[in-house]
Amino acid sequence: MNPTVSIIIPVYNAQEYLRRCVESVLGQEYTDFELILVDDGSQDSSGAICEEYAQRDPRVRVIHKENEGVSAARNLAMENARGRWLQFADSDDWVTPDATKLMVRLAEEEGCDLVISDFYRVAGERVSQKGDIEEDGALTREQFAAHMMENPADFYYGVLWNKLYRRELIRKHRLRMNPDISWCEDFMFNLEYIRYAERFCALRAPVYYYVKRKGSLVSQGNSLAKTIQMKLTVFEYYHSFYKEVLDEEEYQKKRIQVYRFLIDAAGDGIVGIPLLPGTKKLGDERSGVSAEAIAGEGPLSEIYRGRKLLERYLEVAALKSDLTVSEASLLLCLNHSGETVSRRELADFAGISRRTLTMLLQRLSMRGLIRQEELASQKTEEKEKKKKGKKEKRPDKNKQEKGDKDRKIRITFLPAAAPVLEELSLVEQDFDEARFGGFDEEELIQYTHLSEKMKRNMQRILYPGRSV
């Protein structure tokens, strides 16, 4: 049976960092893939490293060939690929543990032909996130091309490694990389692919770590004449693409924007990716874990493992919804706490202070995700009735604060929260799939029975008056 995804990595003299790249792919949560390593005539131990992984993991396939360049290596891999989707990586980069899972899920849910994702730009020990499209849902070819026109020389659009491609489109239209071009060759392939693709989706979560190591065109051994000719070829192809995608009237309106590509890419290669605001130390871009606590025994380690695993999935949902992890976590709590609850109970359930709860509720309200309504208690309503017709006394501040803690609030989710709640349902699904990976049906039934028994035991102690 063919795999769902073929992941392609060209390899040339990459012994220094190849293991990190391959292990990041093999260690992913998504497992229904084949990894095609194309050894492009490496002179170091890269070929042997590839064979080592092929011996250890049946999903790894190795192709050895004479050195012809990265485009020829990718073409050969595409000819031999068996997956329904194609994903690419460079041997000096690496992927996140959820990279393939997130892209395939989005592609299949939205019926997309191309998924384009955010990524991390790595410079030494610093890392920053890079993206461009902030729209949810599928885009048409014209809509996608309009986004690309705004930043025509951006790596986000130009490269292969932050995208997922439908192999059938590539096979049907015989799309290939141009081995005679060593500048913007990825971008030219993408432009050709976009001509035939109809639905596009943006994944607003970084799933790839890009390390800038490539040299200039001159350092690649290209003559000035060859460099100029390559650039002219790419420019002409870019113009031809927009003349085909846009009608004549629309093209004339946006001709100046199209020509921006000539300016933005006039330097040596597509515009680079500077470290952006919000740059972090490599390793701090996502929530970390304590190796000792993860491996530890006892109730505290068990609680820690569960919390960090849930945070791992909440973080992705938060990134896609432009929320903090704390905001996403509170939304999840609200979804399970019922419509009416006291602030004290809600803060306790969420594991945060009442001050933090108030701040997060205000943020979610300002984002238009929830509406909160203060409810008067029954005792307060009775007192108000007795006070009618009498002179009101100045309220006691301490009594008022005490009453506020127990006062009920009603939380209503607004329409804008719907897509976020859908993401949070996937968080719970992923959390359960991770915990119960490898369980058979009998083990799941047994676990459910034992979990219910443990729940009753804890209820008996924590809430003695409640019938269990």
Image (cartoon, grey):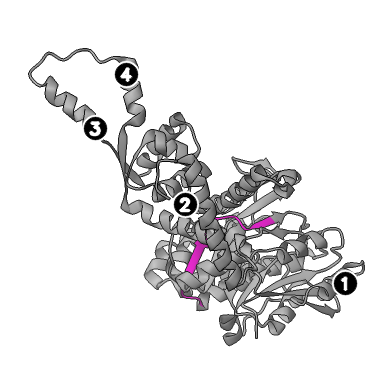
> On residue 47, which mark appears?
1
* Vertical arrangement, residue 3 with respect to residue 124, above or below: below
Q: What's under tag 1, amino acid-wise?
A: Gly
Query: Which is nearer the N-term, disc 2 or disc 3?
Result: 2
Distance from label 4 to label 1 (Cα)? 75 Å
Mark 3 vs mark 1, foreground winner is 3
Q: Which residues are magenta?
A: 197-209
Q: What's under tag 3, amino acid-wise?
A: Ala
> On residue 209, which mark appears?
none
Q: Which element is circle 4 on?
A: helix
> On residue 376, which mark appears?
3
- Circle 2 is placed at which residue position? 321
* Residue at horizontal 18 percent and vertical 30 percent from the top: 381
Q: Residues within 10 Å of mark 3 (few under 14, many from 20)?
A: few
* Vertical arrangement, residue 396 with respect to residue 417, above or below: above
Mark 2 vs mark 1, foreground winner is 2
* Residue at horizontal 44 percent and vertical 67 percent from the top: 138
Is 367 displayed left or right of 23 in the figure? left
Q: What's under tag 2, amino acid-wise?
A: Ser
Distance from label 2 to label 3 (Cα)? 33 Å
Looking at the image, which is closer to me, 129 or 431?
A: 431
Query: Which is nearer the N-term, disc 4 or disc 1?
Result: 1
Whether pointer 2 and pointer 3 mark residues with C-beta atoms closer than 8 Å, the reply is no
Q: Quadrant of residue 173?
A: bottom right
* Vertical arrangement, residue 215 with respect to residue 106, above or below: above
Q: Quadrant of residue 420?
A: bottom left
Looking at the image, which is closer to me, 210 or 434?
A: 434
Q: Which element is circle 2 on?
A: helix
